[in-house]
Image (cartoon, helix red, strand yellow):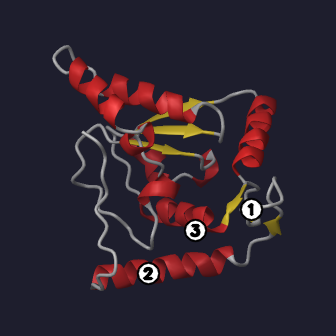
Amino acid sequence: MATVFPRDAGVSTPEADEAKKIYDEARRVVSTYETVPSPSGTLQDYCRHPSGWCITLPIMVSSMVAEQHFEARGTDVLLVTMPKSGTTWIKALLYAAAHRTDDTSSSILRQLASHNSHQLVPFLEAQVYTKDQIPDLSSLPAPRLFATHIPAESLPPSVVASGCKVVYLCRDPKDCFVSLWHFMNNTC
């Protein structure tokens, strides 16, 4: 089944107000970080995390909120990759492997054919913790599959504490850089 995170856009509740305060505080902290020009020179500047990695302000804010509020379970699987290292392809393989049984192989193929792999294995910092919301992930069935480009030192502490599985995909950094350069220059 495709992962869907319900969003209550525009509804003011105590939980929504508290989430907004958490995001505003994260924005305040990130605004103190050093900024660096984007690699392509046409997108917004990047924020440099104190541990050295860089990303755009909205993603940095979401990363900080995820680090504080994501509670990993022992049955979770977290795909950790650098950008442009084959993440989309690996997400599809991970989804198929995690949901593979003899009686559901045709169901998996239907899911993969009808959904983008980013819907099936969402990014913590770009899809789950966004839009000033902190979703309740407790009702998602095991195994919960998530992906991230967040470096290991900035992952939520619950990832280590829970003993969840972490799939780390690396690619030659030069190849990632060349792929990212082409991606940034062809889509901007």
Q: Tag on residue 9?
A: none
Does label 3 or label 1 sit earlier along the sequence?
Answer: 1
- The amino acid pointed to by label 1 is Leu
**Residue displayed at 44% across by 43% down:** 118
SS at circle 2: helix
User: Which residue does the numbered mark 1 point to in the structure image?
Assistant: 43
Image x and y of residue 15, in percent: 30, 79
User: Which residue does the numbered mark 3 point to in the structure image?
Assistant: 61
Label 2–label 1 contact, CB within 8 A: no
Name the one closer to the observer, 145 or 183: 183
Residue 93 is left or right of residue 136, and the answer is: right
Label 3 crowd (10 A; few <14 / some 14-19 / many >=20):
many
Classify residue 136 by image quadrant.
bottom left
Label 2 crowd (10 A; few <14 / some 14-19 / many >=20):
some
SS at circle 1: loop
Q: Is residue 16 above or below residue 50?
A: below
Does label 3 or label 2 sit earlier along the sequence?
Answer: 2
Does label 2 or label 1 sit earlier along the sequence?
Answer: 2
SS at circle 3: helix
